[in-house]
Image (cartoon, rainbow, N blue to C red):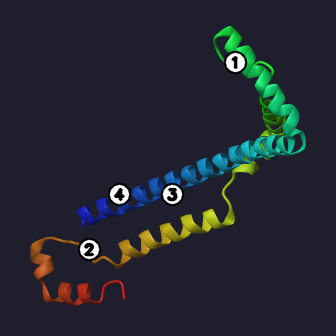
Amino acid sequence: MAHEQMNLQKHVSDRSVALLKGAKAAEVTNQRALLNQVVERAIKTVDEKLETDVDSINEALFESALLGIRKGSMTYENDLLLPLAQATIREEVMKITSLSDQEQLKLVELTENQLNNLKNMDESSKKEFLETAPKLDGLTMGNENYKKMAENWGR
């Protein structure tokens, strides 16, 4: 019986750890999604600029390339797109950092779907544990009453 009590304690501990790891992974996923939104906004801004000003951008890129050839190394001097992308990223980051701590946490908190997935995972683990007959000593497991009990365990 002491062995089964230890198994129960280990099971509860393992489930707790699994829930915490799952929640942490979901939060990291949400943080990455937020970061991706910032990057997508910067790309969209650059794409819009390219669509409207492609000729002047090509001219500036050509002049930048000539300057790089003259200097013997390429830099981002005269790059029209990099400052635009950087400004957009700064603007998006400022929107996030200007929020209160509570509002920032809300941006990466677990969604209902993520919470339901964690609950389902935990319920599945609990059900599996409860449906598994306890393993006792050989003498007890050989007893007819134990065998009958084990046959119907978890049903």
Looking at the rendered image, the quarter that the C terminus falls into is: bottom left
Task: Measure how far apart labels 3 and 2 are at the Cα level.
Answer: 24 Å
Give the x, y percent position of residue 137: 14, 70
Whichever of callouts 4 and 3 sits on the residue coming sooner in the sequence is: 4
Residue ranking furthest to the right: 52
Task: Measure how far apart labels 2 and 4 are at the Cα level.
Answer: 14 Å
Q: Is residue 79 in view from this perspective?
A: no
List the residue tagged with mark 4.
10
Task: Measure how far apart labels 4 and 3 are at the Cα level.
Answer: 14 Å
Whichever of callouts 2 and 1 sits on the residue coming sooner in the sequence is: 1
Residue ID at (83%, 41%): 50
Q: Nearer the viewer, residue 75 or 136?
A: 75
List the residue tagged with mark 3.
19
Q: Nearer the viewer, mark 2 or mark 1?
A: 1
**Does the CB distance between marks 3 and 2 fall below 8 Å?**
no
**Does the CB distance between marks 2 and 4 fall below 8 Å?**
no
